[in-house]
Image (tube, rainbow, N blue to C red):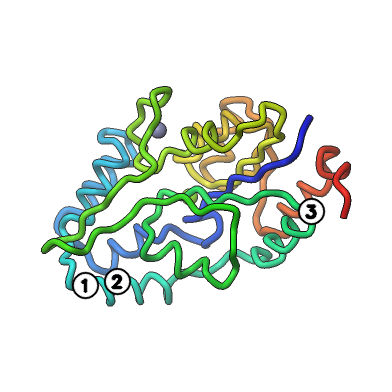
Amino acid sequence: MGKPVIYCDFDGTITDSDNIIAIMKKFAPPNWEAVKDQILSREIPISEGVGKLFSELSSEKKEEITLFAIENAKIRDGFPEFVEFTRSKGIPLYIVSGGIDFFVYPILEKYGPFDGIYCNQADFSGDNIKILWPHACDSLCENKCGCCKPSIIRKLTKDEDNFSIVIGDSVTDLEAAKLADFVLARDLLKEKCLEWNINHQGFKTFFDCIDAIKNRTEVKKLAW
Ligand code: MG
Ligand code: ZN
């Protein structure tokens, strides 16, 4: 086994809860709950649903929504220590998120820099907010993910021998988890890992993640 690489989700993983849901609850565009349910039941693709939700919000609310998202987000315990741990071990840490740049970047800013942050983008130049998808699915994925985590992993894992670790909380991390050598999972993703027989361990805080990763032989081989 080769060098460890970490792919970490943002919403509900680095933050305690989902920021898009919090924004929708607060600014409540018409029918947002129905659209949310359609996304979760996979009736419509994530990209279509998220695009639809934001397209009902005025671009004039940019500052207000951004401030709300930043103030509302709570970082999971142990995250700063976890980032420090990956740095000290020289383990690349990529953030792969279905969130949107206008809240992902400012919330993460004080913990960075990271090896890469992959998320969706918001365009506030029109009347209403338009979501852009700079990391859409490659030819091997047909899920219309929006920000396609498996595609990003395929692109970044150039070395076949890498030991890839995925950290996440939801069904939106499942396709990435299937590509991983080891998964740290909470909430729905943990259930899915059991169902799919994916090599995983549960976690509550990032201190659990540090312990779990430290104990991997692939990591023990690295010099401090
Ligand atoms: Mg998540
Ligand atoms: Zn995809």
> What's the amino acid at mark 3?
Lys
Residue 9 is labelled as none
- SS at badge 3: helix
> How far from the left and from the top, in percent, is residue 83?
67, 61
Q: Are marks 1 and 2 in contact (CB under 8 Å)?
A: yes
The x and y percentages for residue 88 are 78, 59
Q: Does dot 1 land on a helix, a strand or a loop?
A: helix
Disc 3: which residue: 89
The residue that appears at 44% across and 62% down in the rendered structure is: 104
Q: Find disc 1 in the rendering and name its residue.
A: 61
Q: Which mark is residue 65?
A: 2
Q: Nearer the viewer, residue 136 or 82?
A: 136
Q: Is mark 2 within 8 Å of ligand 1?
A: no
Q: Residue furthest toward the front?
A: 158
Residue drawn at 43 percent across, 57 percent down: 18
- Tag nearer the camera, 2 or 3: 3
Question: Separation of disc 3 and disc 1 at Cα?
Answer: 42 Å
Q: Nearer the viewer, residue 217 or 35?
A: 217
Ligand 1 has an atom within 8 Å of the beta carbon of the residue at disc 3: no
Q: In the image as oriented, which residue stretches furthest toward the left? A: 127
Helix, strand or loop status at disc 2 = helix
Q: In the picture, residue 181 is in which quadrant? A: top right
The Cα atoms of the two marked residues, 1 and 2, are separated by 6 Å
Report the amino acid beneath label 2: Ile
Is 35 situated left or right of 93 in this image? left
Q: Quadrant of the N terminus?
A: top right
In the rendered image of this protein, does residue 127 appear above or below residue 144?
below
Residue 211 falls left or right of residue 154: right
